[in-house]
Image (cartoon, rainbow, N blue to C red):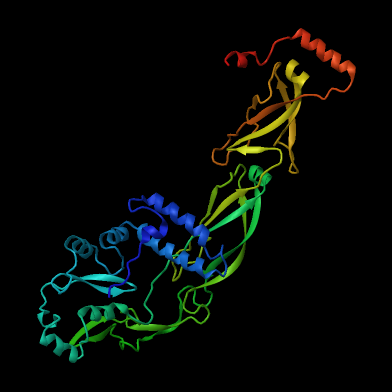
Amino acid sequence: MATKEKDYYGTLGVKKTATADEIRKAFRKLARKHHPDVNPGDKKSEEKFKEISEANDVLSDDKKRKIYDQLGFYSDNIDPAAAKAAARGGYAGGGFGGAQRASRGGQEVPFDFGGFDFSGFQSGGGRAAQQESAGFGGSFKDVFSGMFGGGGRQARGPQPGTDLEYQVQVDFWTAIRGGVTRLEIQRQEQCPTCKGRAVVGGSMECPECHGSGQVTQMGGRMKFNIQCPRCGGSGKVQNACPTCDGAGVLTRKEPLEFRIKPGTRDGQRIRLAGKGNAGTEGAPAGDLYLIIKVGPHKLFQRVGDDIHVKVPVTVMEAALGAKIEVPTIDGDNAGAGHTQLKIPPGTQTGQKLRMREKGVPSATREGLRGDQIVEVQVVVPKVQDERSKEILRELQKLNPEDPRAEMLAGV
């Protein structure tokens, strides 16, 4: 029976026409949700993370994606030219006249059997029955499935380390002024015993192929010389490292200290090269990406590199104009500072006044700084004494304009 084909597009939740950028964004979103570090001990999340990683590995590679789109599955053993021919010509449904599929790792690999005489192995004939009784036992698909099913440990070669991603909580003032932040991460480090090679000791002759690098596999009356699955064709094997069980890396918790630049924004992504998981056999380590999450402030609101603040003023200050003290971020390390702001006569509530270069220093453009936007909030006094009421009545007589006249005129 054919193996079930995997829907990598469905796994990542993207369309078949998705761009490389859309695939990358979809993978990162799902990876943050299902990463084992975020869901410790959750087997379902761990399996889901493996599925989306497999899907991303194929769809993010142009050559692998092309083969997957042509055949509906992917294997490292598929030749691109054979995949293209198979997609163009299709697969023979019953006999061996066209391309056939052999299973490997849960997927199937196309093979072209053109030029071979397999007439004696067709179903329904006496010769076919004779072949089965002689030990062939089924179809050539079974033979090639066995060839590619493999067994034992394959030679892996150097494996680059994978990237890591962590979200870091940073307080309001550290993001604006910069500073040092600490956190603990879990990463794979190079095994100190085998130095990432996954094996220890000297090489010895492979007991499976006796140093030839190939083994013979029988398929009925046919013999196939295939690459030795134990030594990967090298003819030599080594003992797996007992410290890392042949993985080449060990998982460790590590304290990390890094510097936040002044002006760092909420959601900003910081890359620390080589701080991800270690590679094996001398391959480079992955990178560590830190996603900055900036905490709020009770008084200031940050929008990009601008600082917004609401400042209350009295009716008299708004009407007559005044110089008032307003808070700014230019204080000492303990908190905010303050400076003077001129309120123009006739200022209305909700009006915004701009203070040039009183905002946040830019983290990306040297020497530039945002502005501070002050929103005026006119506070109406609570009149208690009779004298104050008389003054306000007199003021009303001197200024009889109706602020609602224009609004009502259009009704």
Specify whether 367 is left or right of 59. right
**Residue that lies at the very extreme toward the bottom in this rendered image:** 134
Specify whether 95 is left or right of 338. left
Q: Which of 203 and 133 is in front in this view?
A: 133
Q: Can residue 161 be seen in this view?
A: no
Q: In which quarter of the image is the N terminus?
A: bottom left
Q: Is residue 268 above or below residue 159?
A: above
For the point 48% across and 54% down, the residue is 29
Q: Can residue 251 be seen in this view?
A: yes
Could you tell me residue 20's position as x and y percent? 37, 51
Query: For residue 172, what is the image quadrant?
Result: top right
Q: Quadrant of the C terminus?
A: top right
Q: Is residue 286 above or below residue 2?
A: above
Q: Nearer the viewer, residue 245 or 12?
A: 12
Could you tell me residue 323's position as x and y percent? 75, 21
For the point 85% across and 17% down, the residue is 389
Could you tell me residue 37's position as x and y percent? 56, 64
